């Protein structure tokens, strides 16, 4: 498989400690209570008992037959699954990280994921962990760093257990609204501030009209979200959507009711979404390749989707901004469009591993600059392969973490002739007792290739 360089993510500047350095400066807010450390216990046992088991190896996270990131942190397998293990995150793999490299916190993805203030590394390694919390305390974080730096042994006391009593939070700067582009340089859309109840995940959509009377060409997309965000994704709607399903502008559409049941009516437009962009980082800034820009037609509208996870005992606030920076058409050599290639025909029998493939052939020469994928919780691997020509069956994209799909850009674009195309090869492990098929809810499945092309 050729090298897959990630989308260039330039995180906004925040004053934080460098990865692998000294412990971060403290704040005053408290961290939710966790099991108390055991006097004299081995350092890894302390980490397992006070951090991994209560905060990570929980329902729908890092436990069970389909854990997030293909990483189970259950007590009987966590150590083996961490030490020198290759991570599912492609950006981390490309940067030479392993889940834990003994003696090297800087090269250990686990440590990066536990440092909460954004901006402590330059590439997108997905959301900080534990998701939906204020993060580990300063003491817990430094305890993990000391353990890794000391060689990450399974037995033995190598980190200062008194650190675990330090419950100060990791420091971030207060959230500030993202400054909008100048009127002649682009436009801003936002999801207005909204509450997220304690111990609740809130995901919603709001449909915003741009107000453009002619085509615009987007050369850069910048996003910013309040803490506790899981993702911020934006879509256009394909031309096949029935008029009655087009959302009303500026109306908040929650996909979950207060009792946590799904609001199917608010989800129907999802079946006609075309990926436009997004991020799982608190701040991101993506620049399209030189000479290219994403064309948005006159009178365009964008469906903004935010997901917040609050696993604390107090409510938090959500909010999200996106800036679309534009350039004159005269500066655009290649006008980009978005790929939306769906396999809706998969049938997944209960209790079985199933792989489904589908080919998508192009009726004109096509140049692809970026690819990403979309599947749901039972998906274990999503491959994209080339169909036809000298690169026939070459894997150009692979993702094994359904919840954190990589968006891969190609410094040397993928050039396909007329009659060539892409093939999705998707594998699912249906651990349920019912047959699964394509659908909109998290209990259904999907297999979609998204990307940018001209």
Image (cartoon, grey):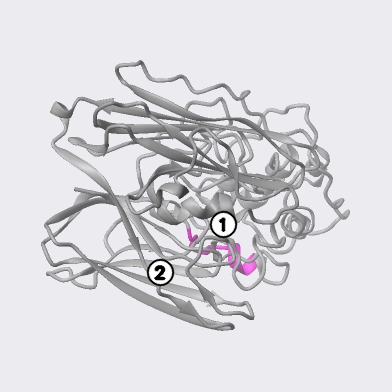
Q: Is residue 267 above or below residue 310?
A: below
The answer to whether residue 370 of the structure is visible from this angle is yes
Q: Residues within 10 Å of mark 1 (few under 14, many from 20)?
A: many
Residue 90 is drawn in which quadrant?
A: bottom left
Residue 185 is drawn in which quadrant?
A: top left
Residue 68, position as x, y percentages in the image: 58, 61
Q: CA distance from mark 2 to mark 1?
A: 38 Å
Give the magenta range.
79-88
Of 249 and 164, nearer the camera is 249
Residue 293 relative to residue 46: left or right: left
Residue 417, position as x, y percentages in the image: 11, 61
Residue 416, position as x, y percentages in the image: 15, 60
Residue 333 relative to residue 179: left or right: left
Q: Which mark is residue 22?
A: none
Q: Main secondary structure of the magenta part?
A: loop
| Mark nearer the N terminus (2 vs 1) | 1
Q: Which mark is residue 100?
A: 1
Q: Is residue 401 magenta?
A: no
Q: Residues within 10 Å of mark 2 (few under 14, many from 20)?
A: some
The answer to whether residue 103 of the structure is visible from this angle is no
Of 148 and 180, nearer the camera is 180
Q: Which mark is residue 344?
A: 2
Residue 389 relative to residue 425: left or right: left
Of 268 and 80, nearer the camera is 268
- Residue sitting at 69 percent across and 56 percent down? 261
């Amino acid at each position: 498989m050729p090298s897959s360089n990630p989308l260039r993510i330039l995180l906004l500047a925040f004053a934080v400690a460098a990865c692998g350095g000294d412990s971060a400066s403290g704040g005053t807010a408290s961290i939710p209570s966790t099991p108390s450390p055991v006097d004299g216990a081995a350092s890894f046992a302390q980490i397992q008992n006070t951090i991994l088991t209560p905060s990570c190896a929980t329902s729908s996270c890092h436990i069970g037959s389909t854990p997030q990131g293909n990483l189970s942190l259950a007590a009987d397998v966590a150590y083996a699954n961490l030490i020198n293990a290759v991570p599912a995150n492609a950006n981390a793999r490309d940067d030479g990280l392993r889940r834990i490299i003994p003696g090297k916190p800087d090269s250990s993805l686990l440590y990066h994921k536990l440092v909460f203030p954004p901006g402590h590394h330059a590439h997108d390694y997905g959301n900080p962990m534990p998701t939906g919390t204020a993060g580990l305390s300063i003491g817990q974080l430094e305890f993990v760093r000391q353990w890794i730096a000391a060689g990450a042994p399974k037995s033995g006391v190598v980190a200062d257990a008194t650190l675990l009593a330090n419950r100060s939070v990791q420091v971030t700067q207060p959230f500030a609204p993202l400054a909008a582009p100048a009127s002649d340089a682009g436009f801003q859309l936002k999801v207005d501030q909204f509450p997220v109840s304690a111990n609740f995940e809130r995901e919603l959509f709001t449909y915003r009209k741009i107000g453009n009377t002619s085509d615009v060409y987007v050369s850069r997309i910048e996003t910013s979200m309040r803490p506790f965000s899981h993702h911020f994704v934006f879509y256009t709607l394909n031309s096949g959507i029935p008029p009655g399903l087009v959302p009303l502008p500026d109306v908040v559409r929650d996909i979950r009711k207060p009792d946590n049941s799904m609001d199917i009516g608010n989800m129907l437009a999802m079946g006609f979404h075309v990926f436009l962009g997004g991020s799982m980082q608190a701040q991101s800034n993506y620049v399209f390749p030189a000479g290219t820009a994403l064309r948005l037609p006159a009178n365009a509208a964008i469906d903004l989707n935010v997901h917040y996870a609050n696993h604390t005992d107090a409510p938090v606030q959500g909010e999200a901004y996106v800036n679309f920076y534009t350039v004159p058409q005269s500066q655009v050599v290649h006008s980009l469009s978005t790929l939306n290639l769906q396999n809706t025909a998969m049938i997944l029998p209960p209790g079985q591993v199933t792989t489904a493939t589908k080919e998508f052939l192009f009726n004109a020469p096509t140049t692809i600059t970026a690819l990403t994928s979309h599947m749901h919780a039972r998906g274990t691997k999503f491959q994209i392969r080339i169909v036809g020509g000298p690169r026939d069956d070459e894997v150009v994209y692979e993702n094994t973490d359904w919840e954190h799909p990589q968006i891969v850009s190609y410094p040397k674009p993928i050039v396909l002739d007329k009659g060539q195309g892409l093939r999705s090869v998707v594998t699912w492990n249906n651990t349920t007792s019912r047959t699964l098929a394509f659908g909109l809810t998290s209990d259904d499945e999907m297999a979609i290739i998204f990307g940018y092309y001209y």
